[in-house]
Image (cartoon, grey):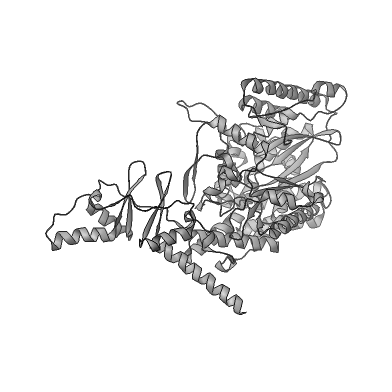
Amino acid sequence: MGESRVKLADSQEEVQRFMKYVLKDLRALDRMLEEGSWFETDPIRIGAEQELCLVDQQAKAWPRSMEIMEKLSADDAGDFTTEFAKFNLEINLKPLKFKGGCLSRMEENLQKKVDQAREVTEALGGEILLTGILPTIRKMDVDLKNMTPLQRYRALSEAIMSLRSEDFDLRIQGMDELLMKFDSPLLEACNTAFQVHLQVAPEEFVTKYNIAQLITAPVLASTVGSPILFGKRLWNETRIALFQQSVDTRTVGDHLRESSPRVTFGNEWVEESILEIFQEDTARYRVMLSSEVTEDVGQMLDEGTPPALKALQVHNGTVYRWNRPCYGVIDGKAHLRIENRVFPSGPTVTDEIANSAFWLGLMNKMEDYYPDVSGKMDFDDARMNFVAASKLGLDTKFRWFDDKRINAVDLITEELLPIAREGLEKADIDDDDITGYLETIEKRVESGQTPSYWMLNNYALLMKENQSKEQSLAAMTTAMIKNQKKGEPVHKWGRARMEDLEHWQPSNLIVEEFMTTDLFTVQKDDILEFTANLMDWRRIRYVPVEDDKKQLVGLVTMRMIFNAYSKSVNHDEEVVESVEDIMIANPITIHPEASIMEAMDIMETQKIGCLPVVKNNRLVGIITEQNYMAITGRLLKVLHSNNNSDEQ
């Protein structure tokens, strides 16, 4: 999609005009499939796209992609492209023939590009990270100010917003629960993937695509790597839920009407050709974007030239199937591909190529064992397997053929890895590559240390050391960067430690990262006895007072409670009954995106031990002396560490 070609379809006339081109493209594709000779079937090629995160020295999202793109040399810049958010970049690898040493060459090519991106980023003062979701991502990072300032991204954002016409409610239930409201589709930019492409002959497409749907769940179970979002422990692969909700243009209606999200696993097995999928997506999903289409596809076919099918490509780019069907033209020959979009980015290049080897091997051999998966398994079971694997990873129990129940570890090690090996052998992949990459999967599965497990385990260990949530996430993220530079696959990674957090400085932190969000509140009409008990039960000294709309109206402290009861006992005064009688009305507050140093300064100068955090008139958190002491303690450690370094 060229920068000047894609725009918002912002009128009914434009939607109608563009839809005519989409329909022409569908008819042209139908003709090409009927005639058959248009498509390249040999050699078969593979390709990949690498998305990555940009982070600063504090391991936070770093929106500097445009500067990095400018610094990349002209020879390298063509392999890099921007993404929706300015804290992401994408690397596009050149296709390779699926044979011989293609996997190790892909790793070598990718590592070279990652190193180039890292070199330029580090020169500007940042770092790069391969991860499905950046653990330290904050709500403020997905503000529209961080959207990449290019026409196609503005058009996509406007299209999503125009179809929704309301804010986004993000709801994900895992070990923790995330309930948040967003006003920006940039939430999608939290997702970072490693996407693998496999070229497929037209006559094999139906079988191959259904195989891809079948194996998505068990392959994903072994590769999960995105368990944390906004400090909440959610699904093992939270990207699956997040991506669907972040670009979901559906609204809630009054009746039980079927409606599919634009991010989808699909609704049924494919029966006849790739055309079925494009027809369904054209019928089911409204045109969001348009472009200036000049090619006459019918005339091009008559002249023997395969068309680019530009209108269909634009519309297909706004429907996000986890196994996406793709059409393309290279060197005057059309081809079909299946794009696997389920793999998270990282945790190392080696892990990513191992994931690709596992998937490609299965894609090349599974049909010999199961030539008609649609006749052996209900599609809903394949879809539910996918959701289950997203949530549970290697702890998933799959519904497999013949109504068999089998856990992920046994299915992968006993059945799928041997089939994947045969599939790679069938493609004449080098023996060393087959053994090396599949052993990486095998050891990861046997040890249970998927990227998600490593992250959740280390996050828990850091939190047990009485570290704050922000520090724990930052230390873990920094440890991931160091491990990626070493290049060892994730099953060999050791513990993350606070010592990994070399550049932590409170002056760079915001209130949102340190505030307490698990709040116990009262309302102004509540009785004082209840408030006193609440403080005693929860061992807290400050209780915010809010109304039914979660708006802050006051603050009660333990000292106020003590004074009220003291007066009633020592001075025979009548005991006040309600919170409203003693609360501080309109207490001093702070915004969640204010710096933590500003919060500390307010608490010190105003001589207060509590600072409610308010956004859009709603109470969202609280900073207390306990948070203050944690920040101060960490600052002292940093100063001590810096002094020791200076002495050395």
Q: Position of residue 199 (x, y in %)?
A: 78, 39
Q: Quadrant of residue 457?
A: bottom right
Q: Is residue 434 left or right of residue 281?
A: right
Q: Position of residue 107 (x, y in %)?
A: 76, 54
- What residue is at 15 percent from the left and 59 percent from the top? 568
Can residue 377 be spotted in the picture?
Answer: no
Can residue 209 be spotted in the picture?
Answer: yes
Q: Position of residue 428 (x, y in %)?
A: 83, 49
Image quarter in which the C terminus is found:
bottom right
Q: Quadrant of residue 112?
A: bottom right
Q: Is residue 566 left or right of residue 4?
A: left
Q: Position of residue 567 (x, y in %)?
A: 17, 60
Q: Residue furthest bottom?
A: 647
Say which of 420 and 490 sits in front. 490
Placement of 42 over or under 474, stated as above or below = above
Q: Quadrant of residue 272?
A: top right
Q: Is residue 447 left or right of residue 370?
A: left
Image quarter in which the N terminus is found:
top right
